[in-house]
Amino acid sequence: MGQTVTPLSAGHPLVALVAAVPLPNAGDAAGAAAAAASAVTVTAGSAAPNTQGLTITGVAAVCTAYATYLGSLSALKKAQIGQVRMLVTSTTVSLSVHSADVTSFSATLATALNTGGNSGPVGT
């Protein structure tokens, strides 16, 4: 597995967005095709138990960005992702995305997370 890392703003209570991307063996055409058509989990979390995290507005912004992403998927990509997993709390984000969309969705999600008012004291 390889990883893609999308940094968040300096001082953001969530560390960064990380996606574990499947890497096929060299010369493995079937593995490459499977990797290109699979689900990948994009995650972000706080480094330690924290009183800072996503605000209620921030949680809603993540959910809205994810709903927009899911609504834009083709029938083929939906079938390739299969079961969708979504976990959003004040200190954790974990979302399933299509492997071909990791970079673009991570950028969209980073924008939502970095928007002022979307992070701060937990429970606000």
Image (spheres, grey):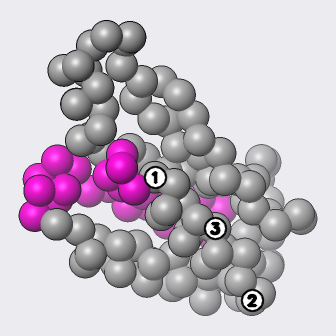
Q: Where is residue 8 in the image (x, y as percent from the top left)?
A: 75, 62
Is residue 56 shown in magenta? no
- Please tell me which of labels 3 and 2 falls first in the chain: 3
- Neighbourhood count class around disc 2 (C-alpha, 10 Å): few under 14, some 14–19, many 20 upward: few
- Neighbourhood count class around disc 1 (C-alpha, 10 Å): few under 14, some 14–19, many 20 upward: many
86 horizontally vs 71: left or right: right
Residue pointed to by mark 3: 110
Residue for point 61% across, 78% down: 112
Q: Nearer the viewer, residue 94 or 36?
A: 36
Q: Nearer the viewer, mark 1 or mark 2?
A: 1
Residue pointed to by mark 1: 102
The answer to whether marks 1 and 2 mark residues whose Cβ atoms lie closer than 8 Å is no
Residue pointed to by mark 2: 117
Work out whether 63 lies above or below 109.
below
**Residue 114 placement: quadrant:** bottom right
58 horizontally vs 71: left or right: right
- Neighbourhood count class around disc 3 (C-alpha, 10 Å): few under 14, some 14–19, many 20 upward: some
Q: What residue type is labelled 3?
A: Ala
- Please tell me which of labels 1 and 2 falls first in the chain: 1
Label 3, secondary structure: give it: helix
Outermost residue, right side: 11
Measure how far apart labels 1 and 3 are at the Cα level. Answer: 12 Å
